[in-house]
Image (cartoon, rainbow, N blue to C red):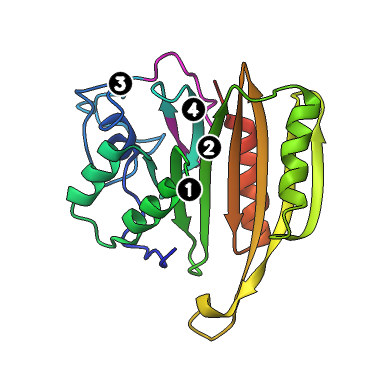
Amino acid sequence: MDRLKAAAVGLAIALAVAGCSGDDETAPTTTQAPSSADHSPTTQEPNTGGIEVPDIPGTFTAAIPSLGFGIAVPEGWQATVLSDEAIERLEAATLAQPSFVEAARNVAASGAVFYAAGIDDEGRVSELKVDVQDGADTSPAGVAALARSVAESGKVQDVSIVDDLEQDRVRVDYRLAADPDAAHGDGEAIDTIGSQLFVPDGDRVWSFIVTSEDSASQDALLAIFEASITF
């Protein structure tokens, strides 16, 4: 995706999710990401539809009844449901940097249902892409097969598969080859760390793809997302 600038980071979930999902027509819109420690008395909380996402410091809650899941997203990130209506609202909004909208369009074209992204103080981009397969094989063998398909796709390297037998989840960790066409300002090619977490839910299997340009960021993000996924 085009590089996000710090001035653009912070579009609230209220604009991209609650205001566009159809679950809460009265939800406010704002250009500042909500803080868990700072709630205006005039701010109306978006409808969570009973999805209770764990409260994690330094994050805000993206509870999306229309999709049937919720997750904690780092404060300062931009996030949106990938519906036509949500993207149209983003396109109509005045953003300091429109690259998030362009990236959201590209991710939506892949079939994903939710997208979030942020940038750290050193200009390194991290992303979350969420997809879901209805009527999928949610058995341990079926989920493991999905993980193997990623590991054996030939598109990733340095692959390892992590099984969370207690929750029937499987995660594929990998690295994407450095892209010389997406170099940093110093000319250094970007090396991207990726993880794809498969989570069974009824007759669905959710896919949470997390990518970062820094291993410490990746570890921290995985800890947040894995701890906060709620159905």
| Residue at the disc numbered 2 | 131
Q: Secondary structure at mark 2?
A: strand
Question: Distance from label 4 to label 1 (Cα)?
Answer: 21 Å
Q: Residue furthest bottom?
A: 187
Q: Secondary structure at mark 1?
A: loop
Q: Position of residue 137 (x, y in %)?
A: 69, 24
Which labelled disc corresponds to residue 23? 3
The residue mark sitting in front, 3 or 1, is: 1
Which labelled disc corresponds to residue 70? 4
Q: Secondary structure at mark 4?
A: strand
> Taking the image as drawn, is residue 227 in sight?
yes
Question: Distance from label 3 to label 2 (Cα)?
Answer: 20 Å
Mark 1 in CB contact with mark 2 (< 8 angstroms):
yes
Q: Check residue 58 for magenta coloring.
A: yes
10 Å crowding of disc 1: few (<14), some (14-19), many (20+): few
Instruction: Please tell me which residue is depicted at 48% across the width and 68% down the height of the picture.
Output: 123
In what quadrant of the picture does the N terminus appear? bottom left
Q: Position of residue 63 (x, y in %)?
A: 43, 27
| Residue at the disc numbered 1 | 110
The residue mark sitting in front, 4 or 1, is: 1
